Amino acid sequence: MGSNKLEVSVEVLPYLRVYKDGTIERIAGTEVSPADLDPQTGVVSKDIVIIPETGVSARLYRPNLTSEHKKLPLVVYFHGGAFCISSASDPYYHNSLNILVSKADIVVLSVDYRRSPEHPLPAAYEDSWAALEWVASHSGGGGGSEAWLKDSVDFGRVFLAGDSAGANISHHMAIRAGSTRIDGLKIHGIVMIHPYFWGEEPIGSEVMDPIRKAMVDCWWQFVCPSEKGSDDPLMNPFVDGAPSLSGLACDRVIVCVAEKDILRDRGRLYYEKLAKSGWPGTVEVMETEGEDHVFHIFNPNCEKALNMMKCLASFINQE
């Protein structure tokens, strides 16, 4: 008798498996938390479709008690997950962003971009750009219809933010905005948390950790198969052919890294390269000792995560 067990075609640990019949099994990032009033933080959220043509949605957050006359900074957030797992409704992101909104007194739009492998890159980048254009449609009496944006957002204080793959997206959105203007949208700053940048040649701690180096190589080759491998400019912003960091369309950047994160040295390199690029803005780096990749997502109420949120709130609200 034949076996009904599906044969695995590709395994991308610890994220997903692709079977030979085309079935995709996500191992992580599949849980969903509903949008609602969060009693712990007093933050309210709702889900909206923002790009009907592609079905791209977002989760919108704001403080529950907001004066109609008070305009708040807007953070457009891009979640992590190696471009292939998680979502804007993931409980980890939902809980973390509730805390950020309450600490910083801001509005957040968390973009639910399409994921690989069903929607290979550059779909995530195109969805994220379309989301920024949608946000801009609400500025200056534009045709946007979302009341939370029109009534509560100061469009002169818009920030891009993201962790891991989302931080990568934030970089590319700011680079694109430097050459393709979005009318009505001024990107004031970028919050980059444990950014997902990489490269073929190992640097720093990667040299001593070939197992994790190979694992990250595998992730990128899965979501963006290319003869350039991890030196594709989408993943390595420092290679020949990548747009100059000096074209970043914002005034301030904060790069957060974690001591035990395999991506730490790439984040520090981004900070160093940006500072020397001729870009006219200001960049700072914040390192959290003793922690690993996106620790604040998995444990948002720990002391170090709350401290990081306070620092990010200060960065966003800095005059």
Image (cartoon, helix red, strand yellow):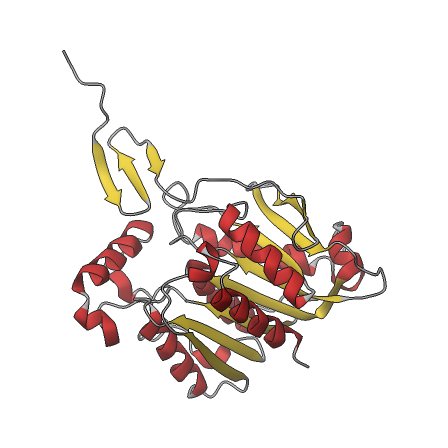
In the image, taking residue 29 as reference, residue 220 lies left or right, namely left
- Can residue 108 be seen here? The reply is yes
Q: The C terminus is located in which quarter? A: bottom right
In the image shown, does 303 or 286 lie closer to the viewer?
303
Figure quadrant of residue 137: bottom right
Give x and y (percent) for residue 53.
58, 41
Give x and y (percent) for residue 249.
56, 75
In the displayed structure, 160 sits above or below 125; it is below
In the image shown, does 29 or 176 lie closer to the viewer?
29
Q: Residue at x 67, y 43 (%)?
A: 36
- Can residue 241 be seen here? The reply is no
In the image shown, does 75 or 295 lie closer to the viewer?
295
In the displayed structure, 70 sits above or below 225; it is below
Figure quadrant of residue 56: top right
Give x and y (percent) for residue 238.
34, 75
Give x and y (percent) for residue 139.
74, 62
